[in-house]
Image (cartoon, rainbow, N blue to C red):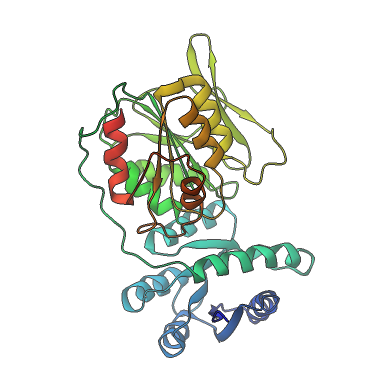
Amino acid sequence: MTARIRVLVVDDSAFVRKAVKRMLGTADDIEVVGFAADGEEGLVKARDLQPDVVTLDIKMPRLGGLETLERLMAEQPVPVLLMSTLTQEGAEVTLRGLELGAMDFVDKSSVQPMSMLSLAEELVAKVRALGRARVRARPRPARPSAEGAAAVPAECVVIAASTGGPTALQTVIAGLPAGFPAAVLLVQHIPRGFTRSLAERLDARSAVPVREAGDGDVVGPGKVLVAPAGIHSRLVRRRGRVEVALDEEPRDALHRPSADVLMASAAEVYGPLAVGVVLTGMGSDGTEGLRAIRDKGGLTLAESEETSVIYGMPKAAIEAGVVHRAIPLDQVAGEILAAV
């Protein structure tokens, strides 16, 4: 039998510690091996217990979550799942935690009796994914090269990511030069209220301007638009230009925004001048979108297993036969620049 995933729960709330143990206890392949009430105790327990995954509260006495995370990544790298709050302040702190090495997060405010069932499913799924993940140093973007450039320069690039995505996106976007000659659109599976903060953080670390997309925004070269969370983004051609259209449909899509929806619209608008890229993440969103781009003659790329935090989305696309090339994360920016 496969060994169970050993979890250390670090949280200053006794109620949350018990609730997390109860929720993870619904899974036969997960075992809570220890608890800590603050960051200092968490570091000691992590050294002693050698867990496979750590759930980490952000706000704690003595040693806060971000300080704990920073020391944990330096002293004993391990997959970390942040316990966050879905507020504007929480979004900023959570994204900082992802930059420091955490792999994913769940909404701590959902740890309530009435909502515990749905949270339990999410918590178990994310712990399982992180239990199979590998902690890696953040790669530096490779120097862009024109080698292997497409015969017809692409005009639009759509990049999709989920778990591990914020850090991966930062690596890719930081590798694009000012004056990048194509439009770039990003889909990151993340809760409402987080995409604006994500865009601001990417913008501060990139040579190309990055901002959250709005309905009717003009799509053009030299800027990056982040699809807002909680609604689908499509590209439409209106009045001789390409614009973003925000849409509630399809309502039954697993993710909103959906990479499949945005990529399919890019394929319709740009045809062979579209590029689709799928990075790290759970699930299979992006597979059908890449299929649409490839069927129109566009270029499709996926992050290779060697650098993926979670090799779910890239693997699904590769196994479906819709990816032209699988490449390490540090080469994605160079491949994109070569295509445009």
User: Image point 34% across, 42% down: which residue?
Assistant: 173
Task: Say if 328 sits above or below 247 in the image.
Answer: below
**Farthest top residue in view:** 239
Residue 145 rendering spot, x and y as whole percentages: 20, 37
Q: Quarter of the image containing the N terminus? A: bottom right
Q: Would you say 194 lies left or right of 26 here?
A: left
Q: Would you say 135 lies left or right of 35 here?
A: left
User: Image point 50% across, 78% down: which residue?
Assistant: 61
User: Image point 48% across, 30% down: which residue?
Assistant: 293
Q: How many marks?
A: 0
Residue 190 rendering spot, x and y as whole percentages: 55, 50
Q: Is residue 206 visible?
A: no
Q: Nearer the viewer, residue 137 or 115?
A: 137
Task: Say if 132 sits above or below 184 in the image.
Answer: below
Task: Say if 79 sits above or below 179 in the image.
Answer: below
Q: Nearer the viewer, residue 151 or 274?
A: 151
Q: Nearer the viewer, residue 210 or 323?
A: 323
Q: Quadrant of residue 108?
A: bottom right
User: Image point 27% across, 27% down: which residue?
Assistant: 179
Q: Is residue 211 visible?
A: yes
Q: Quadrant of residue 219?
A: top left
Task: Say if 127 sits above or below 326 in the image.
Answer: below
**Farthest bottom residue in view:** 48
Residue 252 rendering spot, x and y as whole percentages: 72, 41
Q: Quarter of the image containing the C terminus? A: top left
Residue 311 rendering spot, x and y as whole percentages: 46, 57
